[in-house]
């Protein structure tokens, strides 16, 4: 067994190349200059533990549904969006994977700890621009060129709508105050966090007229920190959610449900024989012309009354009073 000698405090300390201490501290550089050993390798590992934030999965699922509706309304094309997965990664690693031809939207967050990002692939960017400019459906757009000022203006509108969708999705947890601040075509100009900062990412699969692409919502953990406890709770009481919180989230989800609202000028009863006799030019009367009331109905239930008129070139209804909330709730329950 070797003997330990007393160290000379003035002696120069030299770490032997390949020693255990050198490996531990991570000073072993490969021929390509990449550190593969010790603590440095551990610190630089791309594997990041994903904290459990159950409600964030719910937020991203809601965002996916809203993305699909928004894209259909904007492009008048068949569109779908589904949440692919939720993961985490260091911000620097994420930015290194972004295409120079994609577009990144920076979202300011009034009620969170910092901004978020929406990152879209070039396939989505080009196809969305084509559809909104009235391009031929199904036609492929040539990539490789810079977006024009008009195209960037159109994308500003698209990303503003997507940012509003993310904000509404967060409403089941808290008022996030999210809105689009700007869009960037160079990922390095969208650096909202330090390279070593851990981010949680919601990855979405998009389909726009059967053309597949991807979109990501990026949230640094630092931005989510003010609402982390809310995101941890989940829906069950076992996860610590209060009854009031459950009621608020359930109500928020129901308020997103779509119902068909009809404006009915009047009803009347006809015998089948009289109905069969009706022809072109016949006139049917409904109600009192001096008091032309219109009923707003959900299914058969009347929920409000108003007067018919016009606003610009569209038919309009001015309500005499607010909606009967009890009748609307009963009608909505029957329609669901």
Image (cartoon, rainbow, N blue to C red):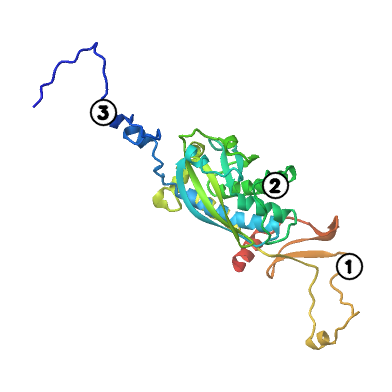
Give the residue at mark 1.
Answer: 289
Give the residue at mark 2.
Answer: 157
Check disc 1 and report its element: helix, strand or loop. loop
Q: Quadrant of residue 4?
A: top left
Give the residue at mark 3.
Answer: 21
Horizontal and vertical percent for residue 331?
Answer: 64, 66
Count of numbered circles on the image: 3
Q: Residues within 10 Å of mark 1 (few under 14, many from 20)?
A: few
* Quarter of the image with the N terminus in it: top left
Using the image, determine if residue 58 lies above or below residue 180: below
Horizontal and vertical percent for residue 242?
Answer: 46, 48
Q: What residue do we see at 85% from left, 58% from top? A: 313
Residue 32 left/right relative to 92: left
Q: Nearer the viewer, residue 45 or 64?
A: 45
Q: What residue do we see at 79% from left, 85% from top? A: 271
Circle 2 or circle 1, nearest the eye = 2
Q: Residues within 10 Å of mark 3 (few under 14, many from 20)?
A: few
């Amino acid at each position: 067994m070797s003997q330990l000698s007393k160290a000379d405090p003035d002696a120069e300390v030299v770490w032997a190349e390949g020693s255990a201490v050198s490996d531990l501290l991570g000073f072993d550089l490969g021929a390509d200059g990449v550190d593969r050993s010790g603590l440095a390798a551990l610190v630089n590992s791309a594997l990041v533990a994903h904290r459990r934030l159950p409600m964030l999965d719910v937020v991203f699922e809601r965002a996916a549904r809203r993305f699909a509706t928004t894209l259909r309304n904007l492009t008048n094309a068949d569109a779908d969006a589904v949440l692919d997965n939720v993961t985490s990664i260091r911000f620097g690693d994420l930015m290194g994977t972004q295409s120079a031809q994609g577009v990144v939207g920076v979202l300011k967050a009034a009620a969170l700890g910092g901004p978020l990002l929406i990152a879209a692939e070039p396939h989505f960017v080009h196809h969305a621009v084509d559809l909104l400019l009235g391009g031929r459906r199904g036609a492929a757009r040539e990539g490789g060129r810079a977006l024009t000022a008009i195209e960037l203006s159109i994308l500003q509108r698209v990303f503003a709508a997507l940012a509003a969708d993310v904000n509404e999705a967060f409403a089941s947890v808290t008022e996030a105050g999210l809105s689009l601040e700007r869009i960037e075509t160079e990922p390095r100009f969208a650096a909202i966090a330090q390279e070593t900062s851990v981010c949680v990412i919601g990855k979405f699969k998009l389909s726009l007229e059967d053309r597949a692409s991807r979109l990501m919502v990026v949230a640094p953990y630092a931005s989510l920190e003010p609402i982390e406890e809310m995101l941890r709770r989940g829906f069950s009481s076992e996860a610590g959610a209060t009854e009031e919180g459950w009621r608020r989230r359930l109500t928020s989800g129901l308020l997103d449900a779509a119902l068909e609202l009809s404006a009915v000028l009047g009803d009347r009863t006809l015998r089948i024989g009289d109905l069969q006799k009706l022809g072109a030019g016949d006139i049917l009367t409904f109600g009192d012309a001096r008091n032309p009331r219109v009923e707003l109905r959900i299914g058969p239930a009347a929920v409000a009354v108003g007067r018919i008129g016009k606003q610009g070139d569209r038919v309009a209804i001015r309500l005499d009073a607010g909606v009967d909330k009890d009748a609307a709730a009963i009608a909505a329950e029957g329609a669901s």
